[in-house]
Image: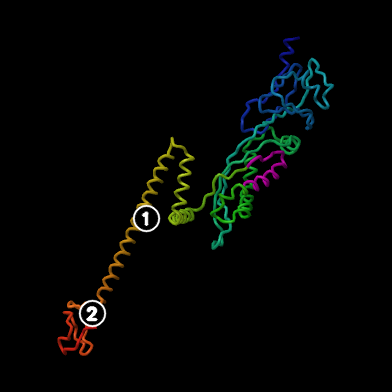
Amino acid sequence: MGFFSNQLSNIVEWEQFRDDMIFWKWDNKEIKKGSKLIIRPGQDAIFMFNGKIEGIFKDEGSFDIESQIIPFLSTLKGFKFGFNSGMRAEVLFVNTKELTVKWGTKNAINIPAPNLPGGMPIKSFGTFCCKVDDYNILIDKIAGVKKQFTIEDVKERIMSMLDQTLMRWIVREGKDIFNLQANAYEISKGIQGDLDMEMQKIGIGITSFAISSVSYPKEIQDMATKAASQSMVNDMDKYTKMAMADSIGKGSGGNGSNIAADMASMQMGMMMGQQMANQMAQNQNNNQQQNINQNQNNNQQPVNPQGGGNVAKFCPNCGTPNNAGSNFCPNCGTKLIL
């Protein structure tokens, strides 16, 4: 009898388990006397009878179905195995781990932008995480008609509504097309809430949603780069401080030390340039002062070499120039001493 008993017994387990599967159903088999249930880490086993949950088992290990499982089943507590009879039930194995999925917009999303009637086309990429949240809803909506359900099935549902959801929250929180990355957290939380609300309808919860990048057309990226360059020139001190902070964050063992050296060289160059500009300005001021002094000297009256005061440069009577500094006009003899 022991030989025949071993031939009739079976192992109830998740066959060919894959990490990307949400659930897998062991069905269309009759559980015989002496059968074992095997639950591995990260799995729950749900016994179902006539489409209803009879019991949920979460502890990992190997269990004798007759002595350790049946006594806990709702309507099958009194079930007794016969020699040639077994229990026809379904066992749904659920992956309890949180699964991470990469996403990306299928097409460019046009968001409102000034002077662009058709909007600004952008693309976005990131990740989201999900896990089974409600077994009853999952069985009622999905597991009742499907043998297995994978993360690709979840991703397909997410992507069918993501573009519209993403555009709605970008328009709502993205106050400036160049500031979407700064508002990424608020946008992500809003999208997560909307997607979670929709996916809860099939018993799946969206535990997180993240935007990794937002890309613009090349023309817009070039314009943003140019604007950033102009801003850097206008505020070089701020740029160098940010670059130095970034190099410190990267550590001295990598490229951070090179960046720090570059920033130091840049600051030294800026100081030398400033000194040159100051020296040029000082030289220009000195030249201007010399010109002023020379003009003042030219306008002074010549001094009488014989004493007695200054002499006129021009004769007040005839207007003849007194280049020699004489006391009397060489033309009309008028006295030139002032």
Q: Nearest the camera: 10 or 63?
A: 63
Say what amino acid the circle numbered 1 marks: Gln
Determine the image quadrant of residue 201: top right
Whole-angstrom CA distance, mark 2 to mark 1, is: 49 Å
Where 44 sits versus 242, above or below? above
Residue at 45% in and 44% down: 244
Mark 2, secondary structure of its residue: loop
Region rendered in magenta? 188-208
In the rendered image, which residue does mark 1 sit on? 274
Q: Residue furthest right?
A: 78
Q: Is residue 201 one of those drawn in magenta? A: yes
In the image, which disc is placed on residue 97? Answer: none
In the rendered image, which residue does mark 2 sit on? 310
**What secondary structure is the magenta-colored segment mainly?**
helix
Q: Nearest the camera: 61 or 150?
A: 61
Residue at 59% in and 54% down: 174
Question: Closer to the N terminus: mark 2 or mark 1?
Answer: 1
Q: Is residue 177 one of those drawn in magenta? A: no
Q: Is residue 222 visible?
A: no
Say left or right for 234 vs 157.
Answer: left
Quadrant of the drawing holding the N terminus: top right
Where 107 sits versus 8, above or below? below
Say what amino acid the circle numbered 2 marks: Asn
Mark 1, secondary structure of its residue: helix
Crowding at dot 1, Cα within 10 Å, few <14 / some 14-19 / many 20+, comes out as few
Where 136 sits versus 300, above or below? above
Say left or right for 138 vs 119.
Answer: right
Q: Residue furthest left?
A: 330
